[in-house]
């Protein structure tokens, strides 16, 4: 995070640079590297009053300077926030490099409409996404192949993993290296199990699947960054059950369906919505099996949602 000589001199002055990994009720927990004897150095901090005057709130993911008040008790004050290279709106976090969208192949069955909402939300915030389908140890080959076909042309990397037996997890670890990755996905798909596999020290509650409704209980209640290795972090966020699209015109929705792009120039009408227009090359590609029916069905549903929202 910083030049070692600068860090050493700063620590002699009682100043340390670190990353906010959690914020709860006005307290910020700042990770400042590892100690050979004591392990992770995490300080409980308050933010200086100057931030309130400037209306600048520290966010999970911020790189900060803090002054150490009690080294033994690991207590300090945040005195400065380093420049952010990005700031997400939902969730409110900073300095995220990419998103990891986790869904299960089965138990529960994937909600494709929700998956597309996650992908659109992340792209709206300037993040590339990795789609991670978990629980392949209990899935049929045909179910996996269907998902591969449906999302092969969406522009995202697709992984099939099993947090239970470790299959595919080392490839995932490689994709996360040297990045801060936001993890998202619905309840019950094994997000916490994936995170616990990547870092067994995370100690996250995995929760049990409710047999009655085949969904997981929400086990994460606040955004939290977990260190995997030096300069490699993952950020778990509270579970979602639904997502509203950010402010968007329905005419812009097609931009988030990248598989449409190579066919749109062949449409008869400029600005074709790919719904009811004649001579639509996108619909022709759909009928020829070149575009996923799963993705197109989601596109139609989201387009209608945006249309209805504009109307009211």
Image: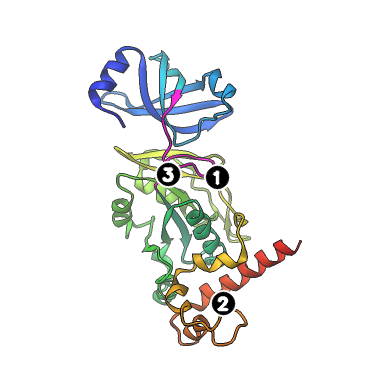
Residue 213 falls left or right of residue 31: right
Q: Nearer the viewer, mark 2 or mark 1?
A: 2
The colouring scheme, among rainbow, by chain, secondary structure or one colour, is rainbow
Q: In this view, does 27 lie above or below 247?
A: above
- In primary-sequence order, the first of circles 1 and 3 is 1
Label 3 near label 2: C-beta < 8 Å? no
According to the picture, the residue beneath numbered tag 1 turns out to be 89
The residue that appears at 58% across and 61% down in the rendered structure is: 214
Among the 4 quarters of the image, the one containing residue 57: top right
Q: In this view, does 297 lie above or below 16?
A: below
The secondary structure type at the circle numbered 1 is loop
The residue that appears at 58% across and 58% down in the rendered structure is: 215
Among the 4 quarters of the image, the one containing residue 219: top right
Q: Is residue 21 above or below residue 138?
A: above
Q: Where is residue 130 in the image (x, y as percent from the top left)?
A: 40, 58
Disc 2 to disc 1, C-alpha distance: 31 Å
**Residue 81 at least partly seen:** yes
Q: Where is residue 33 in the image (x, y as percent from the top left)?
A: 32, 29
The secondary structure type at the circle numbered 2 is loop
- In primary-sequence order, the first of circles 2 and 3 is 3
Q: Does the magenta stretch include residue 265?
A: no
Q: What stretch is highlighted in magenta?
A: 80-97
- In primary-sequence order, the first of circles 2 and 1 is 1
The secondary structure type at the circle numbered 3 is loop
| Front-lying residue, 192 or 306 | 306
Residue 96 got which mark? 3
Disc 2 to disc 3, C-alpha distance: 34 Å
| Front-lying residue, 272 or 55 | 272
Majority SS type along the magenta span: loop
According to the picture, the residue beneath numbered tag 2 turns out to be 272
């Amino acid at each position: 995070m910083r030049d070692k000589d600068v860090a050493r001199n700063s620590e002699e002055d009682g100043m340390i640079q670190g990353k906010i990994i959690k914020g709860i009720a006005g307290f910020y927990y700042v990770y400042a590297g590892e100690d050979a004897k004591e392990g992770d150095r995490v300080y409980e901090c308050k933010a200086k009053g100057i931030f309130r005057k400037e209306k600048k709130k520290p966010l999970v993911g911020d790189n900060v300077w803090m002054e150490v008040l009690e080294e033994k008790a690991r207590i300090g004050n945040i005195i400065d926030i380093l420049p952010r290279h990005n700031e997400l709106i939902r969730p409110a976090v900073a300095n995220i490099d990419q998103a990891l969208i986790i869904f299960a192949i089965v138990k529960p069955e994937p909600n494709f409409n929700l998956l597309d909402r996650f992908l659109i939300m992340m792209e709206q915030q300037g993040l590339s996404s990795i789609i991670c389908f978990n629980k392949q140890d209990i899935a049929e080959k045909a179910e996996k192949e269907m998902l591969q076909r449906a999302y092969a042309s969406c522009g995202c990397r697709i992984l099939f993993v099993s947090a239970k037996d470790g299959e595919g997890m080392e490839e995932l670890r490689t994709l996360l290296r040297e990045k801060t990755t936001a993890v998202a996905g619905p309840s019950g798909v094994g997000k916490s199990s994936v995170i616990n596999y990547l870092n067994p020290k995370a100690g996250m509650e995995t929760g049990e699947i409710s047999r009655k409704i085949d969904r997981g209980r929400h086990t994460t209640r606040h955004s939290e960054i977990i260190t995997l290795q030096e300069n490699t972090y993952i950020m778990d966020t509270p579970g979602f059950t639904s997502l509203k699209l950010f402010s968007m015109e329905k005419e812009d929705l097609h931009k988030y369906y990248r598989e449409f792009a190579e066919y749109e120039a062949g449409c008869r009408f400029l600005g074709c919505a790919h719904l009811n227009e004649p001579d639509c090359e996108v619909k022709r590609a759909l009928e020829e099996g070149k575009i996923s029916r799963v993705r197109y069905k989601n596109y139609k549903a989201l387009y209608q949602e945006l249309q209805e929202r504009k109307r009211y």
